[in-house]
Amino acid sequence: MVKIHSKPLDKTIEIERVIGEIHGGQHGPTIIFTAGIHGNEPSGIFALKQVLEQLAPKRKLVKGKIIAISGNLKALAAGIRFSAHDLNRLWTSELMNEVNNGTLSQTNEDIDELVEIHNVIKEVMTKYPGPYYFMDLHTTSSESIPFLTVNDSSLNRDFVNQYPLPIIFGIEEFIEGPILSYINELGYVSFGFEGGQHDGLYSIDNHIAFIYTTLVYAGVLSKKTADYHHHYEMLAKSSVDSRGFYEVYDSLKIRNGEVFKMKPGFVNFQTVKKNQTLAHLNDKKIVADKTAKIFMPLYQPKGDDGFYMIRRIAPFFLQLSRVLRRFKLDNLLTFLPGINWADKTKDTLLVNLRIARFFAKKFFHLLGYRSIQKDKTHLILRNREAAARTEEYLDAKWKLKST
Ligand SMILES: [Zn+2]
């Protein structure tokens, strides 16, 4: 048992690794929520606890299973983001291979948490049938409207299309090892929800609205049982001017020893003008390179991303990419000089850097490639569609039948 405190509710509760679970009275999917992966973000945990308590007496009306898992318990108890390592940067393929093979070469408090969470998820997936849905709940250091962070696979796109919220693609290209990328690579629907500022009372309410709407969209609750319209309206009215699809195109990385100070007063999604001062890095002024929207400006001591920049994706490009992916046009790319499959699985492209500069990054995004890494001579691009377990979701109402 770990005690965690909510400042806006002025309330302390005791939780364990599994915050709670509901085994529905009817057949359905398995929904797995994680919250508090960052220990200074208890909002999602308070929201999950409340929703599960409300649903417990209505168990017979629930289709499938709902499991709520807490994140960094030690950090949550201490009210800090993490102890030694950010738990949302540890889910790299190298470390997860070690976890899966039982060959961990290092350990600390945060890695212990990673192993425990991983084991619980594995156990849930062994015990309960799919389809599986993973949702990771967070809050931000700046004031913010609620939004979704999504790895751009067709499955995720079809599912998140249901929410009246801003949807942000591509943040995984700028950070290494978030839990959602690990689960996405296993091929399941999984994405993040950011409810608002860490200590805002509204952030807990937004999380509650998100949990209920999610349960309706996944087919676990009826609209009536979830009081859907109330929760939908709550999310919709919070983000009315910013709804739509965005991609992250730039970020400011803070390296070891650098002193970063965001200029006070920026809110998430705020439009900034070209040459406007945004922050200071080691006393050097950082200005906006063009007029754009600022995303997740950092107002807390821990963290290595100062801010991101985002731009809207026009609906035309969303449609175009759907068609390109459906017809698997990436197969034609390998006829070009300097572009090859990394191996026989045909899910990773190696692109010679001399060739790569003729293609905009956006072009590869349209075909479903993300997670770009570079070695000395090549870009390494992974296809988000390759692992998708589309067949497990075929009966879901939200699945767009065109794909
Ligand atoms: Zn977080």
Image: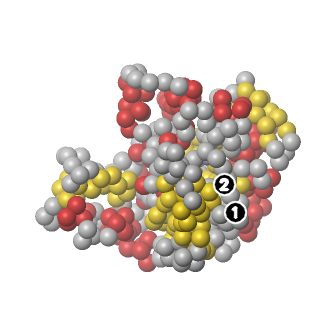
**Element type at marker 2?**
loop
Indicate the amino acid at tag 1. Answer: Pro
Task: Name the residue tied to disc 1.
Answer: 264
**Element type at marker 1?**
loop
Which residue is pictured at 81% across the width and 44% down the height? 7
> Does label 2 or label 1 sit earlier along the sequence?
1
Is residue 157 positioned above or below 302 on the image?
Answer: below
Q: Is residue 336 left or right of residue 220?
A: left
Q: Which mark is residue 196?
A: none
Q: Position of residue 121 (x, y in %)?
A: 53, 33
Q: Position of residue 204 (x, y in %)?
A: 76, 50
Q: Which quadrant: the N terminus?
A: top right
Indicate the amino acid at tag 2. Answer: Tyr
**Residue 307 vs residue 73, the one in the foreground:** 307
Q: Mark 1, residues whose alpha carbon is within 10 Å: few (<14), some, or many (≥20)?
A: few
Is residue 388 positioned above or below 116 on the image?
Answer: below
Alpha carbon separation for disc pair 2 and 1: 8 Å
Q: Are marks 2 and 1 in contact (CB under 8 Å)?
A: yes
**Residue 78 vs residue 300, the one in the foreground:** 300
